């Protein structure tokens, strides 16, 4: 029996956890001229971050050579991309389908035919062999116990459009990683002889299968032109210009004037500031399925947060809309299990299709059911012993520095509980997260993408109290055997249209356990802001109506958006 999926016109995913203001300096060399697409004959101008030198690096080596030039996601493509709905299903790109054996140890790819590289050479199985072979390294069917080896045997290419990969263990979910992070590169450009190794030097000219090819490189302006032989179709965008985004105010001004058409990011206040300055300005927060929030110490029985009723009381006493409003960047609020409610909507129980919300009456009842009381000092107390609380937060995260004091204030107002706000530098925070030496700490809760990536960090051996672990309570919260069985479904099941019922079973089991055990409080959805103007190009596609993430970054996203953009 095999798991199979073929091309379908469904739904795409990935991104960062929170966005930061662009820190690069501004420049007049690449300001987009008198306007973007509509005024400049199909030109789309994108503002993007630059290196510390405030110059774009002339490097198009996707897998080496340091910092790279912008726009590589429109040059190189992956075998599949990730959907923005239905739990992040895989959608075919350079591969038409993949078939896995029942044990997940063998994957057979059928590649798309009729695809060419931008230099005219055909795309074949040799390119996939080179790329995956370099990533995975030498095969070894009998690795040592302490040695991790991907391949049990060499990758096979029985013909120009078939690739067979033999793994040493179940690697069905490796398709997700390949879709998110590993585009295929041309063997005839990258490879030297028969060696499977990415070059580590810089490349000044990219060759890809994507819709764009390099037209001109400048340290402040990188220009791509559309290919007329792109396999995926044509777009009204005939040229993309990348210019430095500069500081937040600089890029907002350029977008408002129509000199730049779009840019990722958004400084605090972008919702009430930039988005209201002009009718043509627009701002949208594009959720990616990850989240950030408060992590509890659930393991050390000498600390109060091992009491599940106390954890639920703290979770239920927060006005999450007020916290999001304080941030001023329009982030979405995740559901109680810590994922975007919309991405997994077709898989979840109905109660998880809504953002997490305050339930103060229930929170007070949970507090009363706990073994702890709140004394006159606002501190937790049990058996005459007082336990003051503090919440640690990384002090260089501007959103956390605004939102966490709001959370702390609400615990005081709604429960009478005093929690000290305790910002720490990154190196100190890293130690706190690794050792588990905290009661409450703010950190990332899960990864973006699919249900497997959302929760996979919790699927690991539990670290003993006092020992260094991974991050926060990953490896410290021990879920039940029933929940482990639900997670095993997500680990061993490729997310395709044919497996939706099985994926839903796993999702519902894991989410129910998180809701019941409250190992964390997810209050901030991960993703990225998109600032844009409709002066030159019509409004960006509505995220709810497309099968990709409406953003510049991430594999496959802008490529799909180019096909949907229309001149103003």
Image (cartoon, rainbow, N blue to C red):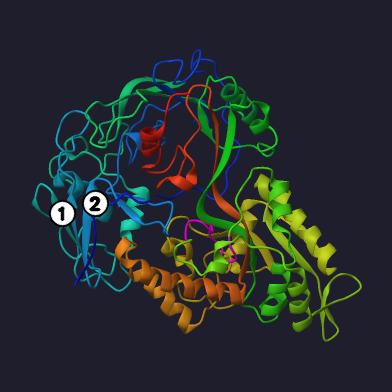
Pointer 2 residue = 132
Residue 146 image-quadrant placement: bottom left
- Name the residue tied to disc 1: 163
Can residue 196 be seen at all in this image of the molecule?
no
Q: Judge whether 421 appears above or below 263 on screen.
A: below
Q: Which residues are magenta?
A: 335-344
Mark 2 Cα within 10 Å, few/some/many (few <14, many 20+)? some
Q: Is residue 434 left or right of residue 419?
A: left
| Secondary structure mostly taken by the magenta-highlighted segment of the chain | loop
Q: Give the residue at x 13% y 40%.
A: 193
Left or right, 88 with respect to 141, comes to right
Q: Is residue 193 left or right of residue 279?
A: left
Indicate the position of residue 551 as horizontal and vertical percent values: 47, 39
| Residue 223 visible (yes or no) | yes
Q: Are marks 1 and 2 in contact (CB under 8 Å)?
A: yes
Observer-side mark, 1 or 2, equals 1
Q: Quadrant of the N terminus?
A: bottom left
Residue 435: percent from left, percent from top: 59, 68
Note whether 195 is above or below 44 in the view shown: below
Tag 2's secondary structure? helix
Q: Is residue 389 magenta?
A: no
Q: Residue furthest left?
A: 158
Give the image location of residue 130, x and y in percent: 19, 47
**Nearer to us in this view, 529 or 376:** 529
Q: Residue at x 18, y 38 (%)?
A: 115
Nearest to the observer: residue 7 or residue 150: 7
């Amino acid at each position: 029996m095999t798991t199979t999926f073929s091309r379908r016109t469904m739904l795409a995913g990935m991104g960062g956890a929170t966005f930061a203001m662009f820190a690069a300096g501004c420049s007049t060399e690449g300001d987009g001229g008198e306007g973007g697409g509509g005024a400049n004959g199909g030109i789309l101008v994108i503002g993007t971050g630059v290196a510390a030198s405030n110059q774009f690096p002339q490097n198009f080596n996707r897998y080496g050579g340091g910092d790279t030039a912008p726009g590589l996601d429109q040059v190189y493509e992956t075998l599949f991309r990730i959907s923005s709905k239905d739990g992040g299903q895989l959608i075919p790109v350079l591969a038409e389908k993949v078939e896995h054996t029942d044990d997940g140890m063998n994957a057979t790819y059928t590649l798309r035919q009729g695809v060419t590289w931008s230099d005219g050479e055909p795309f074949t199985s040799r390119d996939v062999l080179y790329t995956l072979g370099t990533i995975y390294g030498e095969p070894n069917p009998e690795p040592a116990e302490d040695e991790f080896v991907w391949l049990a045997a060499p990758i096979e290419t029985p013909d120009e459009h078939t690739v067979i990969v033999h793994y040493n263990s179940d690697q069905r979910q490796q398709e997700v990683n390949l879709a998110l992070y590993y585009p295929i590169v041309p063997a005839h450009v990258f490879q030297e002889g028969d060696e499977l190794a990415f070059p580590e030097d810089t490349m000044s000219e990219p060759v890809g299968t994507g819709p764009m090819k390099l037209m001109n490189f400048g340290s402040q302006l990188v220009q791509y032109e559309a290919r007329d032989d792109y396999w995926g179709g044509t777009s009204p965008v005939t040229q993309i210009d990348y210019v430095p985004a500069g500081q937040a105010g600089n890029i907002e001004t350029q977008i408002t004037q129509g000199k730049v058409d779009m840019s990722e990011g958004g400084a605090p206040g972008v919702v009430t500031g930039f988005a209201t300055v002009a009718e043509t300005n627009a701002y949208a927060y594009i959720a990616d399925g990850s989240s950030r929030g408060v992590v509890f110490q659930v393991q050390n029985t000498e600390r109060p947060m091992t009491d599940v009723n106390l954890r639920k009381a703290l979770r239920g006493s927060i006005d999450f809309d007020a916290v999001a409003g304080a941030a001023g960047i329009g982030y979405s609020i995740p559901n109680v299990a810590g994922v975007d409610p919309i991405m997994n909507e077709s898989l979840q129980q109905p109660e998880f299709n809504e953002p997490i919300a305050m339930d103060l009456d229930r929170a007070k009842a949970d507090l009363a059911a706990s073994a702890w009381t709140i004394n006159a000092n606002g501190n937790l107390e049990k058996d005459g012993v007082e336990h003051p609380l503090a919440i640690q937060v990384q002090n260089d995260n501007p959103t956390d520095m605004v939102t966490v004091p709001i959370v702390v204030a609400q615990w005081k107002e709604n429960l009478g509980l005093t929690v000290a706000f305790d910002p720490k530098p990154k190196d100190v925070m890293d130690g706190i997260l690794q050792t588990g030496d905290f009661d409450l700490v703010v950190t990332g809760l899960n990864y973006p993408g699919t249900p497997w990536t959302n929760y996979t960090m919790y699927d690991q051996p539990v670290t003993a109290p006092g020992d260094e672990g991974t991050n926060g309570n990953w490896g410290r919260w021990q879920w039940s055997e029933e929940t482990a069985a639900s997670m095993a479904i997500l680990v061993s099941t490729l997310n395709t249209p044919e497996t939706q019922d099985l994926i839903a079973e796993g999702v519902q089991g894991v989410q129910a356990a998180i809701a019941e055990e409250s190992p964390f409080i997810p209050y901030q959805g991960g993703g990225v802001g998109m600032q844009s103007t409709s002066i030159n190009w019509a409004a960006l596609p509505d995220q709810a109506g497309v099968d990709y993430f409406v953003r510049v970054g991430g594999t496959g996203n802008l490529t799909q958006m180019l096909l949907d953009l229309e001149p103003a």
